[in-house]
Amino acid sequence: MPGNHVARPATGEGQLSGLSFAVKDVFDVAGSRTGFGHPAWLATHPPAEVTAGAVTRLLSAGADLRGRTLSDELCYSISGENFHYGMPINPAARERLPGGSSSGSAVAVAAGQVDFAIGTDCGGSVRVPAAYCGLFGMRPTHGRIALDGVSRFAPRFDTVGWFARDAVLLKRVGEALLGPSRPQGFDRVLLAVDAFEQCDPLVRPQLDRAMERIGPSAPLRLSAIGLDRWLDAFRTVQAGEIWQSLGGWISHARPSFGDGVGQRLAAAEQIGHAEAEAARQHVDAIAAELAETIGDGLVVLPTTPGLAPLRSTGSAEIENVYRRRAMQLLCPAGLGGLPQLTIPVGTVAGAPVGLSIMARRGKDMDLLELAAKAFADLPTTPGPR
């Protein structure tokens, strides 16, 4: 990141000794300023006094912090484009979007600049860039990793997530961040039919081949009323919380935004109390429904509907067509507070394809263990730096 680079040596020894990592521009590091993906935020906030808990854990586990990475503006995007700083190059498919909002963290890992990186995932901000850049990416159970020292966005859905080029390292990072746990496995595999219905036909063969590694599955429809209805509830709660978190600063600082982010923030300002409360109640009901439906099963679904859009794709098409389709696949984990892990299962037309596995709350290490066993031979290759 220009203007607020930071690096720190490991403070201890552990399972991550000898490894390097990067942090998204939303994590505080004592003595440096966090930019939240926006130069006006950087200019109006003082240096952090305390380092974020997640960063502290990684340093104490033996990893060296190499730098701070680009975030989409205030995290409110999944494309990877930042109006002020530009868009990182996707090393796995240079002509395509890298995904956001943890775009810089994904690119740094995919390019081999660091061994792993951390980001945040609210509506898909780790899962999407992991899928687009051909990486393993993890969104943990909501609340499993403390968010102290992380820029506040939409607390109902915010999580700390991470990227790695292989499943074994993804698990090692998880052990450092999540603490000790004893995986219990899954009692069945469930194929999310309504999620696969959103999937582009050209990527389905890659997903089906990867499913063979997991085993036979039973069909499951995640939502009885439709994933589009679930998305409406998610977006309303998310937007209301984002304005609560950022509205005061926006009104005071009056920063400029790119079109997509600016439009979403303007819409967020209009969310009324009654609308937000009704949506929160709906989200509570969805979370309970998901917990009942999934039980101790493993849910399999596409991470995104298809390949990363080309960098030349217009912002209106990304916002009005692709974003909504993608968010229908991404919102269930947020609504239920569920852990979800995305796996790079191959390429189509030179672009990566991601398959996701999802489970009930608290089954984070079960997902990491399964990925490390079933997909250990799928390390990604660092792209050109």
Image (tube, helix red, strand yellow):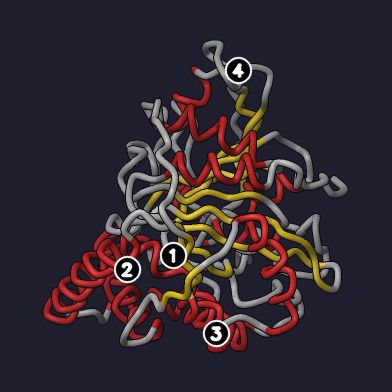
Q: Which residue is mark 1?
A: 123
Q: What amino acid does circle 4 point to?
A: Pro
Name the residue at 61% across, 80% down.
199
Circles 1 and 2: CB atoms closer than 8 Å: yes
Decide which of tag 1 and tag 4 comes sooner along the chain.
4
Badge 4 density bin: few <14, some 14–19, many ≥20, Cα 10 Å: few
Cα distance, mark 2 to mark 4?
A: 36 Å
- Left or right: where does residue 312 sit relative to residue 333? right
Residue 163: % across, % down: 61, 45
- Left or right: where does residue 32 sit relative to residue 202? left
Which quadrant, please, contains the N terminus?
Answer: top right
Cα distance, mark 1 to mark 2?
A: 9 Å
Q: Secondary structure at mark 2?
A: helix
Q: Quadrant of residue 10?
A: top right
Q: Which residue is mark 2?
A: 238
Q: Which residue is mark 4?
A: 9
Between disc 2 and disc 3, the foreground one is 3
Badge 1 density bin: few <14, some 14–19, many ≥20, Cα 10 Å: many
